[in-house]
Image (spheres, rainbow, N blue to C red):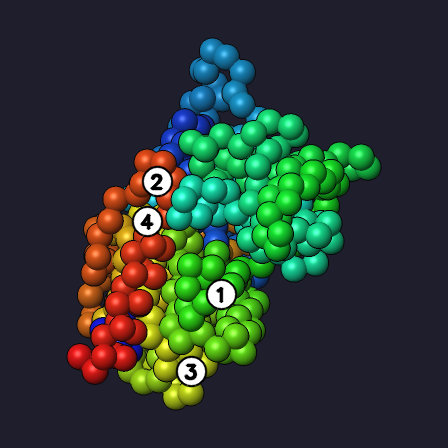
Amino acid sequence: MQKQFSQSSDVRRSILLGIAIGLGIGLVFAAGFFFRDVVDQVQAASVGVVPEAGDYVLLEEIQALLNEHFLRDQPDFTHRQYGAVRGLLQSLGDPYTFFIDPPVAATESDTLAGTYGGIGVQVTRSSIGEVVLYPFADSAAERSGIIGGDVLLAINGVPVDPMLGTDAIDQQLRGEVRAGNGVEITLRKLEDGSEQTLFIEFDVINVPSVIWRVLQEDARIGYIQILRFTARTPEELRQSITQLNDAEVGALIVDLRDNSGGLLQESIEVADEFIDQGVIVYERDNQSERAFSAEPGGAASAFPLIVLVNERTASGAELVAGALQDLERAFLIGRPTFGKGTVQRIFPLSDSSSLHVTSAEWLTPNRQPFGEDGLQPDMILEPDPNGRDVFLEAAVRALQQDALAESSGT
């Protein structure tokens, strides 16, 4: 089973003005989705080299002509400068090399920190379509008495729409943190089936990067969901494995769906916990290539393992899934992944904006690039239109069948 299942000065400063104000709009999406693929940070001075004025004769000429002849008012200096920078970067033809202005950069930092206003629960659907809640540790939800497995019946007196996706439901359980602001929810309690209505005030929620539990469907199987790769992810993963070991589970399902990546080193450390030996990933930049190899003693290297992926599994999450698949350590179930096998470095700039630059690419242990097609799962499934988690159900069945085969000696 282990083998089968087994990411003048003023003129010179304005050399980029007015050239591409409208360009780079498409990079806004990239800035929102790929900001977590930060693998290193350096000081702005490292990119502060100013080209000689003579290098930009054409741009200076155009700016002078605009100043003399343009009919209407030109946008302010900053607006033109940012637009021109985006146009310059777009000419590289790489959607992951992009510029972020200061407000967006600040928002991204907050998001990467994993905080929001809400009650602090993971929202899932059971095999029969019920909405099930799992509170985050030390969250408003946990302090209000919600336990993992409680079924959500209504929000603010309105029954939960059975056709509504879990993301939309989760948004109804979030809001601004201020006195008296919160949400009323009705639950069916796991322990006795009774109904309970609670009003929970919104609080600042520090979202973990790893969530785990023993599956209700089969108490022998542990479930680990990795939401993103942050500095604390490897330690959170080790905590989850310790607790699942204490619960005496015999197999693991690792859920990388909707994980768009994060920090490179932390992604490698996560993969290492499931692997005892072999190359995890190759990293190739414009000068050299290096291999990152597993170290013996991974905390989960002995568990039978299935990994769940989908089209929003990207970057560092693909690194982990690709290593486990190529080394025949895990069986992949789900949808083909996003296909982002490049590394971005982030350079903070002097005005609190930032520049993301593609600096390297990854190859799987079999030296395959991730490419536009992404990783191909061993079992490809279609999502259920009614919201049932058919990917998770298939993983449970596969592990159960394998355990049955082992017990019968076949």
- Residue sticking out furthest to the left: 410
Q: Earlier in the sequence, mark 3 or mark 2?
A: 2
Q: Position of residue 50 (x, y in %)?
A: 49, 51
- Residue 102 appears anywhere in the view: no
Label 4 element class: helix
Q: Which mark is residue 83?
A: none
* Quarter the N terminus occupies: bottom left
Question: In the rendered image, which residue does mark 4 sit on?
Answer: 390
- Tell me: 44 left or right of 175: left
- Residue sticking out furthest to the top: 71
Closest to the camera, between mark 4 and mark 3, is 4
Question: In the rendered image, which residue does mark 2 sit on?
Answer: 90
- Tags 4 and 3 touching, CB below 8 Å: no
- Tags 3 and 2 touching, CB below 8 Å: no
Q: Which residue is rendered at x = 54% and y = 16% of the image?
A: 73
Label 3 element class: loop
- Tags 4 and 2 touching, CB below 8 Å: no
Question: What amino acid type should be assigned to the residue bearing mark 3?
Answer: Gly
Question: In the rendered image, which residue does mark 3 sit on?
Answer: 298
Question: In the rendered image, which residue does mark 1 sit on?
Answer: 214
Question: What amino acid type should be assigned to the residue bearing mark 4?
Answer: Val
Q: Earlier in the sequence, mark 4 or mark 2?
A: 2
> CA–CA distance between discs 1 and 4?
18 Å
Q: Which residue is rendered at x = 52% and y = 20% of the image?
A: 74
